[in-house]
Image (cartoon, helix red, strand yellow):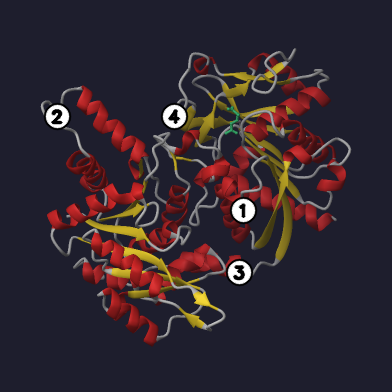
Amino acid sequence: MTKYIFVTGGVTSSLGKGIISASLAKLLQARGYRVTIQKFDPYINIDPGTLNPYEHGECYVTEDGAETDLDLGHYERFLNTPTSIANNITTGRIYQNVINRERQGDFLGKTVQVVPHITDEIKRNIRLLGESGDYDIVITELGGTVGDIESLPYIEAVRQFRWENGSGNSLVIHLTLIPFLAAAGELKTKPTQHSVKMLLEYGIQPDILVCRTEHPLNMDIRKKIALFCNVNVNAVVESIDASTIYDVPLLMLREHLDKTVLAKLKLPHKSEPDLENWKDFLGRLKNPTSEVRIGLVGKYVELPDAYKSISESFIHAGSKNECKVRVEYIPSETLTPENAIERLKGLHGVLVAPGFGERGFEGKIEAIRYVRENNIPFFGICLGMQCAVVEYGRNVLGLKDASSTEMNPNTPHPVINMMEEQKKVKLKGGTMRLGAYPCDLKKGSKAANFYGKTHISERHRHRYEFNNDYLKEYETAGLLPTGINTENNLVEVVELKNHPFFIGAQFHPELKSTVANPHPLFINFVAASMAYARKQ
Ligand code: GLN
């Protein structure tokens, strides 16, 4: 029978519920349990697909094409197992399902209400992953902070779920903050006490408190928290600030979070957690033998969370190469033909990021011209690849004003244009070309060599594509289409013939890089940047 763990948050947001959930899951997985994590987001959007990255950070795309919260990226990077649409539920989806059923007459004669109809739908979604039979333990992270109006139905659903499923089959971990008052020189437990009281008002006694803190919690503080919040002392877990999120599983191991959880769920310890590979990864990450500076050119750079998966992929690839990757965020709209040299000099590699819309487009083109002409390693992802095609069209093929029809619908040379199937799409959200599609790599190409195979599958999120009318011209001029989706002849990878590393991918490799499996394109891009740095 599947066991369920709920993770709630109190006191403030941004305490790192996603990382705590992923770290606990990692420890349980390392002990031989099959674990997955799902996140409930209490907003009314159906999914984060339509949210501006400034609003909510990156939109993470799963294998099955769901547009989801960036926490799912952490789950996959920690666990190295794929998530799906069932792993991210929003209030919008819950209500949509209930309202659709109401229109179908499922509740005929009844008033449809938050309790029981909305809470029933929440509970159905909690059980869904467990009922697949694929998991021993399902961790459900509740977004938001206890006390928020919009979180209430979720908290109520958890209360009902626990009552219906009996003790020992589920538990609640509450993540709170223990602030340090510098003036008093003290850690303060009162906000945690209040936050637990609020949970108690809603009928939930947390089983474990994970306390985020900047200073170690001594035994007196732990005892005090335990006494006021009705938990055992060993269920008060210190979560001290870490230098990297990848330290957190080991910090939680030191606090015996996994053992406490297993004891409360009445599950055997099975084996000691096997974390050898994880520790190797951390060892290399913390002891780099070289360093590179890589520019990330994008339009959402003010909020680094907008490029979370890319920056994490650099961490994985850096560790693999024993190289510290310093990512420098460069706002693309500030780049002009006049200042590009000044802004980009000294970088050992440049990645042009995914994105939408016109703002910053020309700056990306300038960055690409500079790195192409100067043999600096270049990696373009999605819009970044499309920009590389436009740049090459304009500056090498001499196609004046070549562009993507996304940026200039009247361009005389639409080298990137809208995919046929997208032209009829009217609705927003979940309607782009999304999720995993296969791609064939040309034998002997750089891409094929990096992957070590010619048949790959990668995830997508786009509406525009390389215009095959120009394919021959590009190929003859040296920008080679080396990855093709053979079903619809879509160019998925381009690479430049006479350049140390110039690769554009229509797909998003960053969505598949994990600690256990750093992505080959990132590994080799970092390696090429290291080679470039050595020559300087
Ligand atoms: N805006 C481009 C498209 O829709 C690129 C999308 C992206 O970078 N994810 O095709």
Label located before the other in sequence (2 or 1): 2
Q: Depth-wise, is mark 4 or mark 2 nearer the camera? A: 2
Q: Is residue 333 left or right of residue 9?
A: right
- Position of the C terminus by quadrant: bottom right
- Position of the N terminus by quadrant: bottom left
- Residue that mark 4 sits on: 430
Q: What amino acid does circle 1 point to?
A: Phe
Crowdedness near tag 4: few (<14), some (14–19) or many (≥20) residues, C-alpha within 10 Å: some
Inter-mark Cα distance, 1 to 4: 28 Å
- Residue that mark 3 sits on: 286
- Residue that mark 1 sits on: 314
Badge 3 element? helix
Q: Depth-wise, is mark 3 or mark 2 nearer the camera? A: 2
Inter-mark Cα distance, 4 to 3: 39 Å
Q: Closer to the camera, 323 or 265?
A: 265
Label located before the other in sequence (1 or 4): 1
Residue 370 in which image quadrant? top right
- Residue that mark 2 sits on: 107
Vertical arrangement, residue 159 with respect to residue 392, above or below: below
Q: What amino acid does circle 3 point to?
A: Lys
